[in-house]
Amino acid sequence: MQVIIIGGGIAGLSQALSLHQIGVSCRVYDAVPALSPLGYGINLQPNAIRELSALGLGEKLAAAGILTKELAFYNKHGQLIWTEPRGRAAGYRWPQISISRGELHKILLTAIHERLGRDAVVTGHRLTGFEQRGDAVIARFNDPSGRPVGAAAGDILIGADGIHSAVRQHFYQGEKAVFDGYLHYRGIVEAAPYLTGASMAVVGHRSHRAIIYPVMQRPGGKVMINWLAYTRIPPGAPPLEAWDTVADKQACVEQYKGWTYPWLDVHGLFAATTDADVLQLPNVDRDPIPRWSFGRVTLIGDAAHPMQPVGAQAGSQAVVDGRVLAASLMANRDPAEALMRYQNERIAAMNDMIIRNRNLGLESILQAAEERAPDGFTHIHDVLSQEELEHTAISFKKAAGFDVETVNSRESFVDAAMRTNIHRRMFLKLVASASVSPWLPRAAHAQSFPNRFVRLIVPFPPGGGGDALARPLAQRLSEVWGQQIIVENRGGAGGNVGAYQAANAPPDGYTLLLGAAYLSINPALYPASGYNVFTDLAPISLLTVIPNIMMVSNSSPAHSVREFIDYARANQGSVTFASTGIGASPHLSGELFKRMAGIEMTHVPYRGAGPAMNDLLPGRVSVMFSNLPGVMPQVQSKTVRGLGITSAKRIAAAPDIPTIGETVPGYEVATWWGMFAPVRTPADVIEKIRADTVAALGHESVKSRYEALGAPPSPSTPAELAALLRADAEKWAPIVKDAGIKPE
Ligand SMILES: Cc1cc2nc3c(=O)[nH]c(=O)nc-3n(C[C@H](O)[C@H](O)[C@H](O)COP(=O)(O)OP(=O)(O)OC[C@H]3O[C@@H](n4cnc5c(N)ncnc54)[C@H](O)[C@@H]3O)c2cc1C
């Protein structure tokens, strides 16, 4: 099963970790060009820490944040209204952690990179739409400039795309965020600890309120203090929606003049915050909705229940959503039923929470104290009885699902599902095995093939040569088959991550692999890759045989291969060469060049041509070797300077660029690309894919594109491709050994 998660915030990332824990494959897509640690303070209640600890993150979170000991409410005169212990101090088995949202995000993202691999999170992909077709959901994306950037297919789509969710908009068109007329300022500042040193203080009343808590220890005994301050904004002023709008700090600070108390100088704290560290946001939420789950699509986190920042709930509830959803997937064979079960378990409580937060939740006692005693009180119980205070505190925690009894007495949602529903091993077998899982494709036959979308795995990041060849072919095959061919970039380990997945996919023709020279190099480089190139993959057809290219930045002093060799000799020790990854054909092209030209260069491996090109353009590396198709546009537009082609003859697409062999006699490297499938794919299905691929290669739309990329179509039989694979493997094995090339 493959799950698409839209949004790499707290909900999306923690969801991905939970799915990984139960053995379900997923990928996170986020609109931003890069996920960076953003935000100020966020609170994770013990119910969320309980779940994050079950994911093995408890200690990291505790080390990065502050274990909250106390929640204290004060009126605007600084008089104590109510205080209660929090986290471990209140008897929970798990702490409450106040943490910088950026740190929390970083911990989740690092865990994903370590456990699921770097390509489990794809940035620069804004969801623009999706459709459910039979058993699949197909999502479409735009890049940050608004251009379509492809599609992804999965068995389930989870909308974790925050308060302005595009997934939610799909089902609730025209629905608007609700703005309550308040603006809140957020700031973060280093200061001395106050009260217990780990206290969350809430001061004031509805329209004039400050929430203050430390989120991080600093050297010298200081702490980073996160604060939030409310103010009503003039009617008609437009709400601002971004998390990065720098505020008019003075306007905020002015309003808190006089808020200087023996236990904390609130005004002084705000005033001491660097201007640029004060952000302003509108106080927005959305009305509760009756459904989150629609067939194979559902909502989690702020996309499902965007609520006002009261009672420190949003982050915690986002984590819990993901755990309940993972547990529901374990308990239900049918994905749509699982999503409905998740919804039914969560929606009523979260809709209730939205309304409670509009009424200030726990903080309502501040408003009650203000209304009953605006000038302060002699004793709080003259204004609010102990029973009233206790009732408000307990009922909020119970409604939010984090009262001590509930948290301490229940298992982690996922553990409970593992124990009570399906034995874990049985479940994993179910998701891994095509024959027993109702979620996975059934056997295909050539007559009916394909009757749903087909996945073409390109085992490199987007933007490289593989992509450039795969996309026009996928487009043509989609037209011929009347079914979408989804190009999936699965980079990592020199192509092995994607190849491993293809080798282990159901052998039904619905998963194909773009193979290339990496398949013949990797047996020498990764002897324990988990699959066997020769026995686990079925060759279908060669697509093209192409040279690599040697390029320098336009700012390089070298205008030819000869000048580059001279430059390298004059600058020994400082010459670097970029390749698309360790052991890939461009890397070997560079190694061969080094040896044959008699120069020294330090290899700098990148994860694909796109990232390598980013460093070549400003001249951060001296030279780059790459497959030609991915970089042809830059070469032809002279964004970079092509110095030499690795093949024996010049190529039609770039006739002005000499071969490297013209300067270094005998130098020659050519690489190839081909189509593969898992080995037990039925022969008639392989033959249909082969025949249609060969026809597509001859079709003008593909042929002209390939030729423009310097990769003329070159179809073959499966036997010819198998022979080429073997011959190449025999050629590269000794070079990998001699050069001492080791995988990353
Ligand atoms: C940059 C940022 C800073 C924040 N800072 C704080 C803070 O300091 N304190 C606090 O309490 N809360 C903060 N929040 C909100 C808080 O993270 C959430 O309220 C809560 O954690 C629930 O998380 P979520 O994952 O549901 O939503 P979010 O954390 O808002 O994450 C939603 C994600 O979806 C992505 N996204 C949105 N639309 C699309 C689309 N169409 N396609 C693909 N991706 C999309 C966004 O880029 C974002 O990464 C912040 C949120 C963001 C995005």
Image (cartoon, rainbow, N blue to C red):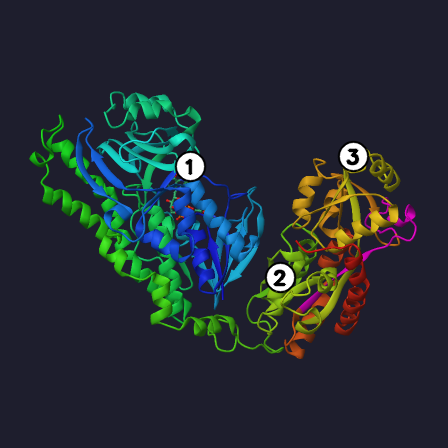
Query: Quick one: 212 or 694, which is closer to the camera?
Result: 212
Which residue occupies the foreground of this view, 622 or 507? Answer: 622
Say which residue label 3 marks.
556
Q: Amino acid at mark 3?
A: Ser
Disc 1 on helix, strand or loop? loop
- Badge 3 or badge 2: first in the primary sequence: 2
Check mark 1 vs ligand 1: CB closer than 8 Å? yes or no. yes
Give the residue at x 25% y 40%: 71
Is 377 on the left or on the right of 146, as rendered?
left
Q: Main secondary structure of the magenta part?
A: loop
Name the residue rendered at 30%, 28% in the picture. Answer: 233
Q: Is residue 472 visible?
A: yes
Q: Earlier in the sequence, mark 1 or mark 2?
A: 1
Image coordinates of residue 123 in percent, x first then y, are 54, 47
Residue identified by numbered label 1: 243
Q: Amino acid at mark 2?
A: Gly
Numbered badge on residue 498: 2
Q: Quadrant of residue 706?
A: bottom right
Q: Secondary structure at mark 3?
A: loop
